[in-house]
Amino acid sequence: MSFVTVSRAPLDEIQAFKQRMGWRFQWVSSAANEFNYDFHVSASKDEIATGKMYYNYALGGLVSEELSGISILCKNEAGEIFHTYSTYGRGDELLVTTYVYLDLTPKGRNETGPRFNLTDWVRHHDRYSAAGSVDSSGRFVAIESAEPSCKCAEAKS
């Protein structure tokens, strides 16, 4: 059994980010193929143009150009590969342990910002004080002149 993460980013960008974050898991690029489109986690140009995307087994409004999903593939002795399971949206949160821990806290995920999701305040460990947000392509965009948007541990007596 293998665990592999797939992203549409070019491999050199993935490797640089892995090194920056200190991550060691297997992460591959699908930039040169249709993998993400086949599993309906990346919006096509047509979906972006229409504002509708097939995701989580339904056609709905386009929320982001890149969304999450978990798929299980099985390879038999003959070398044939079978798609045996997929889950999307809230169904894949078990592997995002940040969500599991946040759900245990008094404010939960605190999805009360302008986008009503974690992109309003969640940051990588080397960007805790960075102001900005995640754009529709899934990339963090820093705002140099703004105040940090995360006031995570305000103490009140």
Image (cartoon, rainbow, N blue to C red):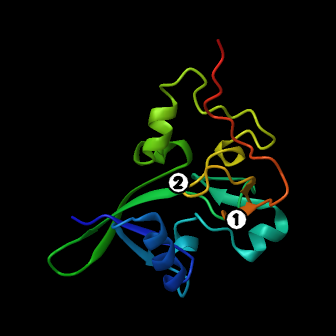
Residue at image point 41% right, 42% down: 94
Can residue 45 be seen here?
Answer: yes
Q: Is residue 83 above or below residue 95?
A: below
Per the rendering, the mark at residue 65 is 1
Does 13 sit left or right of 133 as displayed?
Answer: left
Quarter of the figure with the N terminus:
bottom left
Q: Position of residue 47 (x, y in %)?
A: 75, 68
Which sits earlier in the primary sequence, circle 1 or circle 2? 1
- Give the quadrant of residue 85: bottom left
- Give the quadrant of residue 32: bottom right
Instruction: State if disc 2 and disc 1 touch (CB < 8 Å).
Output: no
SS assignment at label 1: loop
Mark 2, other Cα within 10 Å: few <14 / some 14–19 / many ≥20: few
Q: Amino acid at mark 1?
A: Glu
**Marks 1 and 2: which is nearer the front?**
2
Residue holding disc 2? 125
